Amino acid sequence: EVQEEITHKIEQFYFKEGHNYDINNHQNLTNLFSDAWFIAGIDEYIKQRVEAQRSNQLPPFYVYMFDHRIPSSLSELFGKIDKYFGVSHVDELPYLFPIDRYLFVSSSPTENDIKLREAILQMWVNFAREGNPTPADSNLTRWEPVTGYPFNYARLGHKIPEEFTVLQMEREMNYSDRMNFWRQLKAHIPAEQRKQQLRDEL
């Protein structure tokens, strides 16, 4: 019963105009998988961390969204399609580990790729050493820690080369309506716990 209710709500939200899996109409399905597998969980964790930080002495934490089109995107491994579908999960890993050397032997980094790679390496090392990706002596834009909810985050790179920046602080993600949907759906909560919450609300 609960599963059917959740399924129906998902269909209504993501497939308002019915199911259409044509390659030119992929975005609704892409959004569904992205939100269910990543966005909803990340959003829930950040919310819990912010609440915990108010009552405990926890170190600062930082959120980022990798938004850069790299020359060796892992999305290419999922199918040989000329169309670009956007940044893939773990696309930033080639900037930290030499996996593209073996998977994408013909890829050639641009000037922006090199800038971003060097910045990411510097920020990750800074965070490991000092707990701050952009300490006072850093020459990068300051990466501000999360202090509340809705949360601020660093957008790293850009899909459009002409709009490239290494780090841009932002607050509202452009899919807040999708986040709100999963918060209200509570699909990750076990059935018994859902019933208990309903009883508590009543």
Image (tube, rainbow, N blue to C red):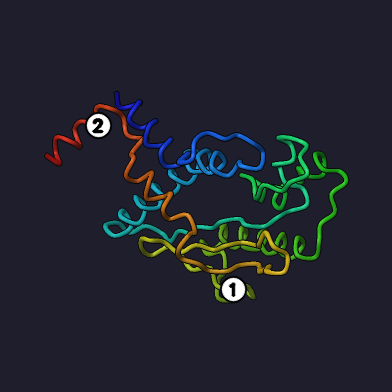
On the image, the x and y values in percent for residue 119 come to 68, 64
Q: Residue furthest right?
A: 106
Q: Mark 2 points at which residue?
A: 193
The foreground one among 8 and 67 is 8
The foreground one among 112 and 174 is 174
State if disc 1 and disc 2 touch (CB < 8 Å). Answer: no
Q: Name the residue under label 1.
A: 141
Determine whether, in the image, residue 108 is placed left or right of residue 112.
right
Circle 1 crowding by C-alpha within 10 Å: few under 14, some 14–19, many from 20: some
Locate the N terminus and report the quarter of the image it occupies.
Answer: top left
Judged from the image, the secondary structure of the residue bearing numbered disc 2 is: helix
Amino acid type indicated by mark 1 = Thr
Q: Is residue 7 above or below residue 140?
A: above
Q: Residue furthest front?
A: 17
Judged from the image, the secondary structure of the residue bearing numbered disc 1 is: loop
Determine whether, in the image, residue 2 is placed left or right of residue 99.
left
Name which quarter of the figure residue 191 lies in: top left
Q: Residue at x 64, y 45 (%)?
A: 88
Amino acid type indicated by mark 2 = Gln
